[in-house]
Structures are given as structure tokens and as C-alpha cells.
Image: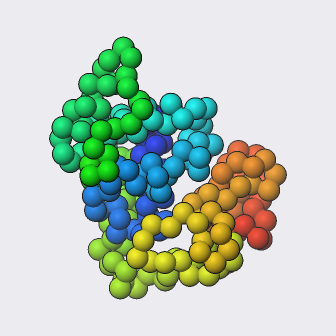
């Protein structure tokens, strides 16, 4: 998996964790940076050492590299493509990012997430908030999370719902993991979701 595919996968997982239907809707580029997967919350999981690496991945994604997303308006994608083909790309910010959106490519979802996982996301999105899915719960305090918006932090306990630090090594772990992928430590009962 390439670094850009890891970035895309993290975006999909963060969206699906808060609202599975969000993977089928246009996503504001500004929201990716500010709330869905901000650099400070994603850098460890993505193995990034600087915010410039994060910005480059975002520009590559919005530029349509790898066919992972379709950007609207196309002029924003073209600007990103020009920057990445330049010897000195401007990574200070994507012009028009407040109104620009990206739509996740269905084939890219299948390719990066696997056909079964992508089908599960599509089914959950089709069911929508009124479907038979149980409400999302905070992996720490088990309180219900708002279903009508993207949530990075629990409104009840204030802890991150998109990443849980390993008790042993501090690496980011996804809600629901039983073991740390970095050190193999079993997740403590406090971090593991209730079953």
C-alpha cells in the first residue's frame, strides 16, 4: 500500500467511524484538514514526520492521483496537479478549499479497503441513520455519539474516538482493536469497546 493509499484509507475509516453514509457524499476539502483527519491526530498512524508531508498527501489526493477521488471544481484538482509536477510545489494551502469537495471513487474504495469492507460501507450508507445499525458509541465511556455529524472527540468524556493511544507505546490505535499493531500489547479494558 502506498503512502497516498494509506492516507485515503485513514480518511475512509475516519468517515465510516462517525457516519458510514459520509463515504458516498462529497467531502469538503477544508473538513478533511480541519476535522475529519487533522495532521495532529493522524501523523503517527500515517508515519508522517512533518506537516509538509501531510500537506503533500492532501494535495496529491485532491489532485486526483491514483484515481482515489474526483474533485469539484476541476480547477482545484488542476492546481494540485500543477503543484505536484513543479520542482517547488506550493504546499501552503489549496486555493478554494473552503468550497472545493472530493467524492470518493467506488472502485478505489474496493481496491484500498477490500471488496467486503467496501460493500459493508456501501450497505451501511444505504441504510442511513434510520437503518438497523446500532448507534455509534464512544470506545472509552460508551456514551452514544452524535449520528448527524462527523465526530473526532466524544462530547461526554472529551477523548478521541478516531484514535486511542496504546497504554504501552503510545501509538494510535483504531476503536475496536484488541491489540496494538506497533508493539502487540493487548488493549486495556478501559480502551477496548464494550462487547
Q: Nearer the viewer, residue 99 or 116?
A: 99
Q: Nearer the viewer, residue 106 or 146?
A: 146
Q: Residue furthest top?
A: 87
Taking the spot 70% from the left edge, 69% from the top edge, the residue there is: 192
Residue 13 horizontal/vertical position (percent):
47, 57
Q: Is residue 138 left or right of residue 150?
A: right
Taking the spot 18% from the left edge, 45% from the top edge, the residue there is: 73
Q: Nearer the viewer, residue 103 or 110?
A: 103
Residue 1 horizontal/vertical position (percent):
47, 37
Residue 16 horizontal/vertical position (percent):
44, 64
Q: Is residue 147 above or below residue 74?
A: below
Q: Residue furthest left?
A: 74
Residue 43 horizontal/vertical position (percent):
59, 42
Q: Is residue 49 left or right of residue 21?
A: right
Q: Is residue 74 visible?
A: yes
Taking the spot 34% from the left edge, 38% from the top edge, the residue there is: 94
Figure quadrant of the C terminus: bottom right
Q: Is residue 105 visible?
A: no
Q: Is residue 184 left or right of residue 7?
A: right
- The mark tally for this picture is 0
Residue 15: image quadrant is bottom left
Q: Nearer the viewer, residue 191 or 57?
A: 57
Taking the spot 78% from the left edge, 47% from the top edge, the residue there is: 169
Q: What colouring style does the render use?
A: rainbow
Q: Is residue 191 above or below residue 127?
A: above
Amino acid at each position: 500500500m502506498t503512502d497516498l493509499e494509506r492516507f485515503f484509507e485513514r480518511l475512509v475509516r475516519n468517515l465510516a467511524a462517525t457516519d458510514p453514509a459520509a463515504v458516498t457524499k462529497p467531502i469538503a476539502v477544508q473538513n478533511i484538514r480541519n476535522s475529519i483527519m487533522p495532521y495532529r491526530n493522524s501523523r503517527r498512524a500515517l508515519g508522517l514526520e512533518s506537516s509538509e508531508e501531510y500537506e503533500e498527501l492532501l494535495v496529491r489526493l485532491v489532485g486526483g492521483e491514483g484515481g482515489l477521488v474526483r474533485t469539484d471544481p476541476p480547477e482545484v484538482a488542476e492546481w494540485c496537479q500543477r503543484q505536484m509536477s513543479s520542482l517547488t510545489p506550493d504546499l501552503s494551502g489549496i486555493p478554494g478549499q473552503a468550497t472545493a469537495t472530493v467524492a470518493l471513487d467506488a472502485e478505489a474504495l474496493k481496491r484500498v479497503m477490500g471488496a467486503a469492507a467496501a460493500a459493508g460501507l456501501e450497505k451501511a450508507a444505504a441504510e442511513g441513520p434510520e437503518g438497523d445499525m446500532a448507534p455509534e458509541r464512544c470506545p472509552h465511556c460508551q456514551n452514544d455519539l452524535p449520528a448527524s455529524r462527523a465526530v473526532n472527540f466524544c462530547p461526554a468524556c472529551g477523548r478521541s474516538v478516531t484514535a486511542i493511544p496504546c497504554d504501552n507505546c503510545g501509538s494510535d490505535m483504531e476503536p475496536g482493536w484488541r491489540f496494538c499493531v506497533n508493539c502487540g500489547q493487548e488493549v486495556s479494558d478501559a480502551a477496548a469497546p464494550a462487547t
